[in-house]
Structures are given as C-alpha cells and as structure tokens.
Amino acid sequence: MQIIEIQRFRNPWLWSFLILVNLVFLFFGLRQFIWNIPLGNNPAPNWLLLIIIALPLSILLLFAFSSLRTSFNKELLEMRFFPFLTKRFQYNNIQEIEVITYSPFFDYGGWGIKWNMDGWAYIVSGNKGLSLKTKDGKKYLIGIQDPEKYQELLKLIQV
C-alpha cells in the first residue's frame, strides 16, 4: 500500500489578497510607466518601478507553483515542499509517528514552512497532519489531507 498526496495553497483569502496586491502594484506601475503620470512629487525611476512590480508578482507565482507532496509506503516517508526542500524519513530512524489534528495558525503561526519550539512544520492547507519524532529527538509535522488512509498505513509499519 502506498499513499501519494499533493497539496497546493488553496485558501481563498490568500489568493484574493495576492491578486489584489498585484493589481494595485500593476495599476500604479503602469500609470507611471505607460501613461507617464508620475507617482507623487518625486517619482521612482522606471527601473525601480519594474522591480517593485516584479516582487509581488514573484510572490504570487511562488504560491501558484508551490506544493507539498507526501509519499508514504511500507519502507519510507518522503515529503517534498517544492521548490524548497525534500525530506526522507526511514522508519528505523523514527521513534514516534501519529496522525494529529492541529491549528496551523495558533500552533505554528500560519501555513508554509514553519518552526516553533516543538520543531519544524510543513503546512499547506487543512488541520490534519503526521506528527513524527526521530530517534535523534527532532520533531516534524507534515500536513495531510486524508488522515484515514494514513492511519491504515501506520498499522502496517513497525515504529
């Protein structure tokens, strides 16, 4: 049995905010860049304006292409938070593993790659996750969408 899960950022408020910010920056940038209506009494040069427009657009694209891919089978748990990192956990290096319910905002301060005093968290959406502790004492939380499937697989592995 194997579980492969791919999650993306899908929070409507996040996308509304990102799109609104990009539209505002684009409007004011185009206003000066194309229509030659300067922004304020001392307008920024056009090259700086392009950088200012590109920054929120880059953040929007980063969220659009980011994903959390979890692959869980009898031998290995692999988590890939694209485009940032990949982590592989061999079961013989895991001391504890369980499916938990958590609050992304109150327990970790939101979504994304987070750290608190308990350890690292990789959260894209939802409030279910795999909590694991390695034999060297490190703790991780990996967000998941289908906890029932993971519960079934946890019964098959010996941790």
Image (cartoon, rainbow, N blue to C red):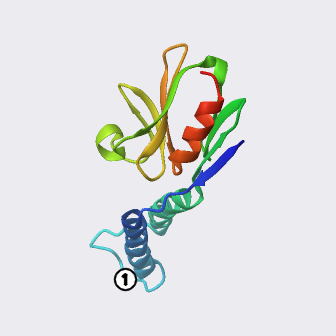
| Residue identified by numbered label 1 | 37
* Residue 148 place in picture, x, y as percent: 53, 46
Identity of the residue drawn at 60% across and 58% down? 65
The three-letter amino acid code for the residue at tag 1 is: Ile
Q: Kindly state the secondary structure of the residue where label 1 is placed.
A: loop
Badge 1: residue crowd in 10 Å (few <14, some 14–19, many ≥20)? few
Image quadrant where residue 39 sits:
bottom left
* Residue 10 place in picture, x, y as percent: 48, 62
Image quadrant where residue 153 sits:
top right
Figure check: 118 above or below 43: above
Number of callouts in the render?
A: 1
11 sits to left or right of 146? left
Q: Tell which of 88 and 129 is nearer to you.
A: 129
Q: Tell which of 6 and 55 is nearer to you.
A: 6
Asked if residue 113 shows in the view, the reply is: yes
Identity of the residue drawn at 44% across and 86% down? 35
* Residue 59 place in picture, x, y as percent: 49, 58
* Residue 155 place in picture, x, y as percent: 60, 32
